[in-house]
Image (cartoon, rainbow, N blue to C red):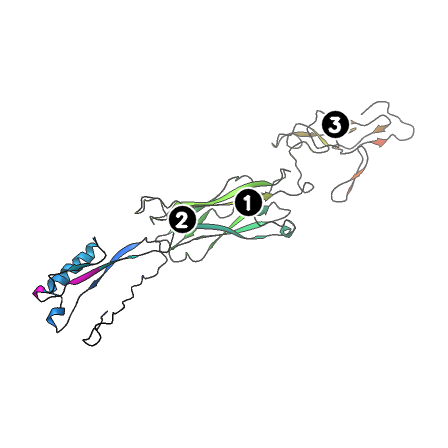
Amino acid sequence: MSIVIQPGDWETPREVMVTGLDDWFDDYNTTFTVVVTFTSEDPLYQTSDLAALAADRQAANVAKTSPTDSIGTGVSNGYLAAFVVPFTNVDDDDIGLVAEIVSVTGGHCASIGRTGVCSESYYGCVATLLVYTTSQPKETLLLTVTSSNPTEAGPIESIVVITSEDWRTPKEVHVESYDDPLQDGDIPFNVTVATLYSPDEDYGQSENKYGTHGLLKATVPFISKDDPTWFDTVGTKCPKGYFGSYTGKDEGDFYGCRRCPAGTYADEENDKVDCRSCPPGTYGLVEGAQSLQSITSWNGIAEDPGCMPCPNGTYSATWG
């Protein structure tokens, strides 16, 4: 740009506004210079070619020891010095990784009333995370998404890709519980989004100009909501109608537990050596009976009693 100073207004200072060009990169604070040279028909207000060249060289080196340096031979030989004014363009972008919960959707999710929740099949809750960076990566960024308890719950998407072109669009990650028949209660876990690889020194594994790595990580806490006890079919102990020791393995009649034989019943959910015997005067025909008397199951179906009175003309004098 040019500034015109005339003999009649030379006492009025001229303002030059220097502004940094805005971008979305974290490109650090950058030093630069503004060079002022003079051209005039007045021989005392001219900058020589030599002084202008020296000023350009100094500006390229950006090696300053004082706020403003003059370059040239001064006015004693008829030339005006050039001035090199140093500046620092302060960057306002920072690298960063954000993962936040924006919604939880599913059939019975409204009854839970919490946002950091996913659930097994009864509630059917799936949480949605938005993942994004706080500044524009210079190269493509690959992120991993992992669960701290991968056997209970975790992300559907395991890799997130953010490019320099689409970084403004948050990426969705969906988090779900893995359905099981266990009555294992609500289980807390974390979902972690972390840098896998990027050639960008600020978002990748290479050292940046400050000697640090851009290995970023964002962790979001969750709770995996268990199905209601009546919905799950397997507890952590032998259920009603079974005896033995619960192992959780697919063995025996039911994960290590065995069904109560006819003439016995088990009305408690725990590990037990054997089932209770029907009292004298009764008999039983049902295997896996859950009660001495007739009961109604969770879905409203009447089940046969574990023990029934002996028919007329018969008796049972012993237990079982």
Label 1, label 2: how far apart the Cα atoms are: 23 Å
Residue furthest top as drawn: 318
Q: Position of residue 207 (x, y in %)?
A: 32, 44
In the image shown, does 54 or 278 lie closer to the viewer?
54
Q: Which mark is residue 142?
A: 2
Name the quarter where the C terminus is drawn: top right
- Dot 1, crowdedness within 10 Å: few (<14), some or many (≥20)? many
Q: Is residue 224 magenta?
A: no
Q: Amino acid at mark 1?
A: Phe
Q: Which mark is residue 222?
A: 1
Q: Which mark is residue 275?
A: 3
Q: Amino acid at mark 3?
A: Cys
Q: Residue at x 50, y 51 (%)?
A: 100
Question: Which picture quadrant has residue 135?
Answer: bottom left
Q: Amino acid at mark 2?
A: Leu
Q: Is residue 253 above or below residue 227?
A: above
Residue furthest bottom as drawn: 8
In the image shown, does 87 or 117 lie closer to the viewer?
87
The stretch of residues the image draws in magenta is 76-84
Q: Which mark is residue 154?
A: none
Q: Between disc 1 and disc 3, whose residue precedes?
A: 1
Q: Dot 2: what SS?
A: strand
